[in-house]
């Protein structure tokens, strides 16, 4: 019990909210028993763990590991599979621990493979290959080949990373451990590192002027009817006056005050409203004097450079589909739900009040029919009263001008 208690004190798991839905798990175990590990995971994840006692006896012990910023799936895989050497299955909120299939799931020996650049169709040298959750790491050679030696793990996940390319992960089994192939592609978000001036594409760190770059992913985060509305609040110094864009104030007195619009390298005289926001790959806003150095006096008020989407790879078709759906609450036209009465209810309520007003003397509520008749007559004489037909009819009934039958008709 002392060992279990000590392990629980050493094992610290923190749940940190990231974006309202996802959580990052930081786990740390130092020579903890399998029982202590499972109890800690159960407490901090809220999951139920189902297993037979002899399964934990077969687990690797003690458990020592330290991870930060993991998803729930990554944390379970690294702690249970990599460090405890057990298989598991997650069903709803229950984790079922299993024995590994010896000889089928356990990878033992050297993991070998090759890394390829699929766009250039050639081996990729210098890529980093690592076993997820361990310190084993290597680098691909000039032929793109790699070897990770002396591995003993339960279905490990091997990941290849390279600067400017999408990371690729492969689950290793005894069948494919000597023939792993990573097909890596260029990361499309690298567009934000390049500034398009219209004349050239230049790396952001080599750009001397003031520029703001907005990618298509950023534009799609907002739903707007035109590009200008989308750029407002994203580009410092960009504002609108009279529905027209202004960059860092007006730069000319008598000429056009609008910034120069360049679309795919061609200056145009149109407006931003003419461009479909969904056709845009990126927007670069050049804001200082360096813009004038490129395009001359026409760029005195800045430049907005728009690059539209085009094919990225020969023989491959990419289709982007966007749809906007707007819905409104169906208006409730019911009279009572909107605090209105039907004509019949209105007449009934008003006649009941007039019966009280002209024929019921009520000292408690200070209602005097004779005084009401005098006030009504005075209002008619001075033109200050605009009675309803029912009010006027009851006034006539109270003064004897008509009888009850005439009132009803």
Image (cartoon, rainbow, N blue to C red):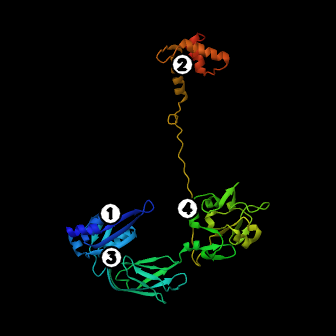
User: Which is nearer the N-term, disc 1 or disc 4?
Assistant: 1
Tell me the residue that label 1 is attached to. 44
Task: From this view, report whether residue 136 is shown above or below residue 21.
Answer: below
The image position of residue 99, as x and y in percent, is: 26, 74
Kindly report which numbered mark, 3 or 1, lies closer to the viewer in this rendering: 1
Q: Specify the farthest residue to the right.
A: 254
Q: Callout 4: few (<14), some (14-19), or many (20+) C-alpha neighbours within 10 Å?
A: few
Disc 3 target residue: 82
Q: In this view, does 42 lie to the left or right of 402?
A: left
For disc 4, the marked residue is 221
Report whether residue 281 is seen. Answer: no
Q: Which element type, helix, strand or loop, lies under badge 3?
A: helix
Q: For marks 3 and 1, give the CA distance.
A: 20 Å
Q: Regarding mark 4 in the picture, which secondary structure is present there? A: loop
Which one is earlier in the sequence, the residue at label 2 or at label 1? 1
Which one is closest to the eye, mark 2 or mark 1? 1
| Disc sitting over residue 354 in the figure | 2
């Amino acid at each position: 019990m002392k060992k279990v208690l000590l392990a629980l004190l050493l094992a610290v798991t923190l749940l940190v909210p990231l974006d309202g839905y996802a959580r990052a798990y930081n786990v740390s175990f130092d020579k903890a028993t399998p029982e202590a590990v499972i109890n800690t995971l159960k407490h901090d994840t809220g999951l139920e763990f189902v297993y037979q006692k002899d399964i934990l006896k077969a687990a690797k012990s003690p458990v020592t590991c330290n991870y930060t910023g993991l998803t729930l799936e990554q944390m379970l895989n690294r702690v249970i599979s990599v460090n405890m050497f057990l298989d598991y299955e997650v069903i709803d909120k229950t984790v079922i621990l299993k024995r590994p299939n010896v000889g089928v799931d356990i990878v033992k020996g050297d993991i070998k493979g090759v890394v390829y650049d699929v766009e250039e169709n050639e081996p990729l040298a210098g890529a980093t290959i690592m076993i997820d959750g361990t310190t084993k790491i290597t680098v691909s050679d000039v032929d793109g080949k790699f070897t990770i030696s002396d591995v003993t793990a339960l279905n490990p996940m091997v990941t290849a990373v390279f600067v400017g390319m999408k990371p690729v992960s492969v689950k290793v089994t005894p069948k494919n451990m000597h023939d792993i192939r990573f097909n890596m592609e260029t990361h499309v978000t690298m567009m934000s590192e390049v500034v398009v001036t219209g004349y050239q594409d230049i790396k952001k760190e080599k750009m001397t002027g003031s520029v703001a770059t907005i990618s298509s992913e950023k534009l799609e985060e907002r739903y707007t009817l035109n590009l200008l509305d989308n750029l407002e609040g994203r580009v410092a110094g960009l504002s609108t006056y009279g529905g027209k864009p202004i960059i860092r104030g007006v730069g000319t007195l008598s000429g056009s005050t609008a910034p120069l619009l360049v679309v795919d390298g061609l200056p145009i005289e149109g407006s931003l409203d003419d461009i479909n926001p969904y056709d845009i790959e990126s927007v670069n806003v050049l804001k200082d004097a360096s813009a004038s150095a490129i395009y001359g006096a026409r760029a005195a008020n800045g430049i907005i450079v728009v690059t539209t989407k085009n094919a990225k790879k020969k023989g491959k078709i990419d289709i982007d589909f966007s749809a906007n759906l707007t819905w409104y609450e169906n208006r409730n036209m019911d009279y009572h739900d909107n605090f209105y009465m039907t004509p019949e209810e209105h007449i009934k309520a008003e006649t009941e009040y007039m019966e009280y007003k002209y024929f019921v003397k009520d000292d408690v509520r200070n209602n005097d029919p004779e005084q009401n008749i005098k006030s009504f007559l005075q209002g008619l004489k001075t033109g200050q009263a605009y009675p309803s037909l029912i009010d006027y009819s009851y006034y006539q009934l109270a003064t004897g001008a008509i009888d009850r039958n005439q009132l009803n008709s």
